[in-house]
């Protein structure tokens, strides 16, 4: 039983390293593409810095995606957004 647990711990850490490498390469690809080949144009770098990875609980899945939302929109109170005609979803 101890051998299985030690394998699972090293496997999770290895998957975490792989996720970090792939997320970093995705950031580099996005920064260097500059709008070519259907990549979005990087104006402020918010999208590039928001790319991160998540490791599943079991450790067999790594998900790389942008994990930040539009902060400026959600800082406004709901009433002010409603008065501006932006509604709940913007």
Image (tube, rainbow, N blue to C red):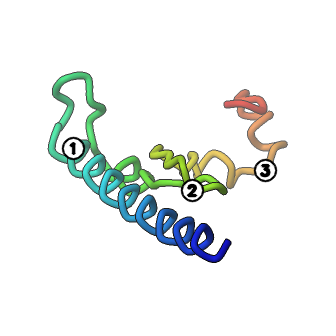
Q: Which residue is at the front of the view, 37 or 19? A: 19
Q: Which residue is at the front of the view, 54 or 75? A: 54
Q: Is residue 4 left or right of residue 21?
A: right
User: Residue 77 shows which numbered tag?
Assistant: 3
| Residue receiving disc 1 | 29
Q: Are marks 2 and 1 in contact (CB under 8 Å)?
A: no
Picture layout, residue 81 above or below residue 18 = above
Name the residue: 48% across, 63% down.
11
Q: CA distance from mark 1 to mark 3?
A: 36 Å
Residue 83: quadrant of the picture: top right
Q: Which residue is at the front of the view, 4 or 28? A: 4
Picture layout, residue 76 above or below residue 20 = above
Q: Position of residue 40 (x, y in %)?
A: 30, 32
| Front tag of 3 and 2 | 2
Query: What residue occupies the far top of the structure in this picture?
Result: 38
Query: What residue occupies the far right of the structure in this picture?
Result: 79
Q: CA distance from mark 2 to mark 1?
A: 26 Å
Residue 34: quadrant of the picture: top left
Q: Is residue 24 left or right of residue 4?
A: left
Picture layout, residue 34 above or below residue 20 = above
Name the residue: 29% across, 51% down.
27
Q: Position of residue 48 (x, y in %)?
A: 34, 51
Of the 4 image quadrants, the one containing the C terminus is top right
Q: Position of residue 89 (x, y in %)?
A: 72, 30
Name which of mark 1 and mark 3 comes first in the sequence.
Answer: 1
Q: Secondary structure at mark 3?
A: loop
Q: Are marks 3 and 2 in contact (CB under 8 Å)?
A: no
For disc 2, the neighbor class at 10 Å (few under 14, some 14 to 19, many from 20) is some
| Residue receiving disc 2 | 59
Q: Secondary structure at mark 2?
A: loop
Picture layout, residue 39 above or below residue 10 = above
């Amino acid at each position: 039983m101890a051998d299985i647990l030690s394998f699972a711990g090293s496997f999770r850490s290895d998957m975490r390293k792989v996720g970090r490498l792939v997320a970093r390469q995705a950031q580099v690809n996005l920064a260097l593409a500059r709008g070519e080949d259907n990549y979005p144009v990087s104006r402020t770098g918010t999208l590039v810095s928001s790319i991160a990875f998540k490791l599943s609980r079991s450790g067999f899945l790594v998900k790389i995606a942008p994990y930040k939302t539009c902060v400026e929109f959600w800082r406004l109170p709901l009433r002010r957004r409603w008065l501006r005609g932006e509604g709940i979803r913007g």
